[in-house]
Amino acid sequence: MRPPILDPLFAPVSTLPGIGPKIAKLVSGLVGTQPDRDATVADLLFHAPASLIDRRHRPGIAYSENGDIVTLDVTIGRHAAPPRHSKAPYKINAYDDTGAIDFVFFHPRRDWLEKTYPEGQRRIVSGKVEWFNDRPQMVHPDYSLEPGEAASMPQIEAVYPLTAGLSSKTLHKAMQAALDKLPRLPEWLNGPHLQKTGWPDFADALRTLHVPSERSDIEPTSPFVERLAYDELLASQLALALVRAHMRTLGGIARSPSGKLQAAVVGALPFQLTGSQSQAIQEINEDLAKPVRMLRLLQGDVGSGKTVVALATLAQVIETGAQGALMAPTEILARQHFASMQPLCEATGIRLALITGKDSQKERRIRQEQLEAGDIDLVVGTHALFQGSIAFKNLGMVVVDEQHRFGVHQRLALSGKNQGVDVLVMTATPIPRTLVLTCFGDMDVSRLTDKPAGRKPIKTVSVSLDRLDEIIARIGSAIQEGQKVYWVCPLVEESEKIDLAAVADRHRVLEHALNQTVSLVHGRMSSDEKDAAMADFKSGRTNVLVATTVIEVGVDVPDATIIVIEHAERFGLAQLHQLRGRVGRGDKPSSCVLLYKGPLGETAGARLNIMRETNDGFLIAEEDLKLRGGGEILGTRQSGTPGFRIANAEFHADLMETARDDARLILETDPDLDTARGEALRSLLYLFGRDAAIRLLRAG
């Protein structure tokens, strides 16, 4: 049960003044953590400001620099309204002792302007100054107040990330109302630690974050932000520690078969295992042989052969008479795992099945009966695998692919399908150590560091979009030589419509320029349409595939040798590296073209340089952490991942270590969270959406 003191924070944002259903939907899209329900007041409060506006700067008109936000004490002069039906702006002249300025308005309501800016009267006006033809102007000022009302204007104003259709005024008003609902919560940090750090209490820290009095208040190293970051990290570490403790209490099953089935799978491979693949298989076998549940992370760079390791170790479990499950984040990926495992399973007598959300009820019922009867040894699927109705005769091991797409919750749901289920988590985004701690707690880690024999390195170049025609011509000649090409367009989250137009547009241009059919894949297509387009590309009916980032994970077309990534400056490093991994999967040399629109910012330039210099995913992950902090590396905003809203791996890595030690100590001294501090910690877990772990206390 959620502590009642938290109820005001778990009310939907639509209960706040000024937020109707339409605005609630926009706010939920911006700050919500659950895709299928309204954001809560707590979600809103954890939406941290990105910067500040300081309205204390009052230089006078003549001394206002271009681009500065200033507050001016002016006398309103003449209104110059444009003629009817003209598209010209409405201008209001104003002056002070130092000079004159124009306030500029587009599509204005004249009566409102005359009331807000009355000729001949004094007004305090605040906004951004721009110099145009040696004359200052302010387009749509933020505030215009009578001198007597000036005190009501915030001197320092938080600036939040917004979304199309949501104004900063609306968000500010909602934030203020949310702060009014903030209760005084019991302290969950221990006294000595609090004294040592000098941090404020949770509510004060949150208030200061949204109503700062200095720029330094919202810096990552301020005591207010550090306090909240530590709370968030502690919630995450405590939840992970509870999951681990729960898994240990359930006990595991020692599985040490003869190893015949595993040897058969390895023997059926058309290639030799790499050194690190053999090492990983050995580490997992040792885990399986112990009577403790395995929870291991298998990190491999793109194309390092994780699926082979997974299948070999699943064979070890299947030989003991138990069943295995492999869970993938997308249907495309689940089908690919199924297709790549099928020949090996047929050769070694492993009974393999696929379950996806697209199966008809009849197919699903048949699969369900086979699983319960033990007629299926290994099942591959999407999240459909952990939905209530699916039951196994004797599930022994679960492999979760692309971990960061799944939360801790789903992991628990799957491993809870039977007593002592071993869990192997695979990720193709190599993760720096600090982040391994963050998202996986004390998981044991195996790393695949070498590439399979015969793989050629991928040559990466960056080219300005101005040379688009030249690139298209070179793609044309590559196709004549029988090569296959991916062309990736970015997603700009603001508007899917613009994205689809951009992808469709590029598709049209390429079909026309290359004079042949080009495949197209994007997120708005049905699974059947996507599958058909992929099949055409795979079979060679088409040689070019234009896609949005839906191809980021796991699309496997070994004879594709070129990938063009358009607007590469908009992508993060991990994503560029994932996309580049779609080529270089066969024995032919491959290339990756990063098309960028100049001029490049410093970070974007650094990203493209790193991509040109190295193919090593582990190195790229470390650089990525330096460039943009940890929240993003694994894709944010997915439950149970480091989609941290306040903590930032770059600035708060040391807090992460402390939080982990703190969590361990808490569970040693108060395993059921029964003490007064334990009760307070339960509130903390709920606040940061880690309450699944509380259910384990009861379940265990």
Image: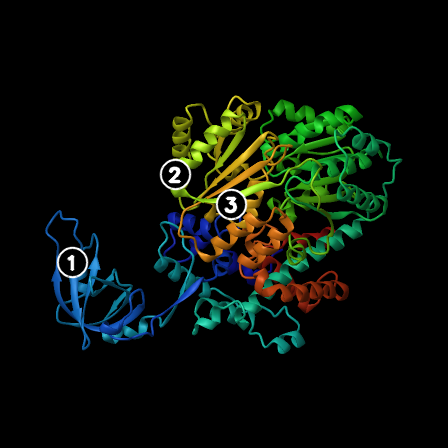
Image mark count: 3
What secondary structure is found at the residue carrying circle 1? helix
Q: Which residue is at a point 33% across and 71% down the rendered structure image? A: 55
Which residue is at the far right?
258
Density class for disc 3 (Cα within 10 Å; few <14, some 14-19, many ≥20) is few
Density class for disc 2 (Cα within 10 Å; few <14, some 14-19, many ≥20) is few
- Residue 89 lies left or right of residue 567; in this view the side is left
Tell me which amino acid carries mark 2.
Lys
Density class for disc 1 (Cα within 10 Å; few <14, some 14-19, many ≥20) is few
User: Quadrant location of the N terminus?
Assistant: bottom right
Q: Is residue 529 visible?
A: no
Q: Is residue 59 visible?
A: yes
> Which of the 4 image quarters holds residue 471?
top left
List the residue tagged with mark 1.
111
Q: Which residue is at a point 12% across and 54% down the rendered structure image? A: 82
Q: CA distance from mark 3 to mark 2?
A: 20 Å
> Which of the 4 image quarters holds residue 642?
bottom right
Q: CA distance from mark 1 to mark 2?
A: 36 Å
List the residue tagged with mark 3.
35
What secondary structure is found at the residue carrying circle 3? loop
Taking depth in this image into account, of 112 and 474 the one nearest to the observer is: 474
Tell me which amino acid carries mark 1.
Asp
Q: CA distance from mark 3 to mark 1?
A: 42 Å
Q: Residue 124 location, x and y as percent?
A: 24, 72
